[in-house]
Amino acid sequence: MIDLKSQTLQEVTDTLKAMGEPAFRGRQVFTWLHKGAGSFDEMTNLPKALREKLKETCTLTVPKVARKQVSKLDGTIKYLWELADGNCVESVLMQYHHGNTVCISSQVGCRMGCAFCASTIAGKVRDLTPAEMVDQVLFTQIDSGMEVSNIVLMGIGEPLDNLDTVLRFLELVNHPDGLNIGMRHISLSTCGLIPGIQRLAELGLQLTLSVSLHAPDSETRSKIMPVNRAYDVEELFAACHAYFKKTGRRISFEYAMIDGVNDHDWQADLIARKLKGMPGHVNLIPLNDVAESPFKPSRRVAAFQRRLESHGVTATVRRSLGGDIDASCGQLRRKAMEEARKGEDSQ
């Protein structure tokens, strides 16, 4: 069966041509797909015979809302989407003055093993398809009734570990006949897979690259981020400098503040030294308290910010949204998995 929604406009057109259809049918089908059509029968400007043919030869992904939580504090909406194979992923819709941002997943689970992250606890199950990534944006809009203007690839999974799919997704959501969301409104977060960063630099996409730094020294970073053993933080900083030199795009460095681990003044000083010559932005993240993790939120966020700023480094503290609805990535999926296991054990 053909996964039409994972295809580009040209590929959809070629698929339709192979069925004996005229070229203009490709654009019609592509537009329906990216409006969030739930079935081929909804594509009312297509002949009935073609709709029947599409049912026989193609699949149409439509995720189910397995769970939905709405924050009473700020209106943030957390979705747990059930995919066709029964696996689940999360998306979060956040409202800002500049528009609505959806944070989406790129994989079912994650194999990066970051010690403070709920997404990686059960490991990686599989990569998402381009269609399953597009669906998170589409059906978040449809269910919430709110138009999405910004996308963040910072949900479950490591985007650069599923890079070909992510690049296809970016092409699809950027297309004027699709969601038409500009690259400058898209942010991609990585834990530091250097080959992927280098590939993005060569492509010169106008998206915002966010690097999950979380420690500027190799000893600390290796303890909390296993990826550092494959791609050391010194190599990572070098790759970031090369990325900036190639693209001219400022990088955002994500930094989860962990009590007594990465919140010392000397670490702020080291960040400033490593960023010298590159206009980086450090986004300090108050750590979410994950039950299985021994790490606790830092009590030195403001002091760490001041220390960075004293060196001329732009540092902000991420506004915490959805604190009452498990809005941190992986928490809702983990909770659902635990409840499912308990249900099985009780049978």
Image (cartoon, rainbow, N blue to C red):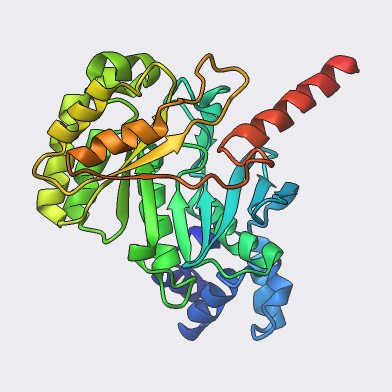
Return the x and y of residue 345 as percentages of the image width and height.
Answer: 84, 15
Query: Residue at position x 38%, y 53% from top?
Result: 187
Which residue occupies the extreme right position in the image? 347
Quadrant containing the N terminus is: bottom right
Quadrant where the C terminus sits is top right
Please, is residue 247 above or below residue 272 in the view?
A: below
- Residue 251: image location, x then y, percent: 25, 48
In the depicted structure, whether residue 151 falls above or below residue 44? above
Residue drawn at (9%, 50%) of the image? 245
Horizontally, is 71 left or right of 329 in the view?
right
Q: How many circles with numbers are drawn on the protein?
A: 0
Q: Is residue 211 left or right of residue 44?
A: left
Q: Using the rendered image of the protein, determine whether residue 8 is visible from the camera's viewpoint.
A: no
Residue 22, image x, y percentages: 49, 84
Relative to 334, 299 lies left or right: left
Identify the residue at image location x=11%, y=39%: 276
Tell me which residue sits at (43%, 64%) in the image: 172
Q: Quadrant of residue 303?
A: top left
Residue 141 visible in rendering = yes
Q: Within the image, what quadrant is residue 207 found in?
A: bottom left
Q: Position of residue 113 (x, y in %)?
A: 44, 22
Q: Is residue 290 above or below residue 108?
A: above
Q: Nearer the viewer, residue 280 or 166?
A: 280
Front position in the image: 72 or 162: 72
Question: Vertical placement of 307 versus 166: above or below?
Answer: above
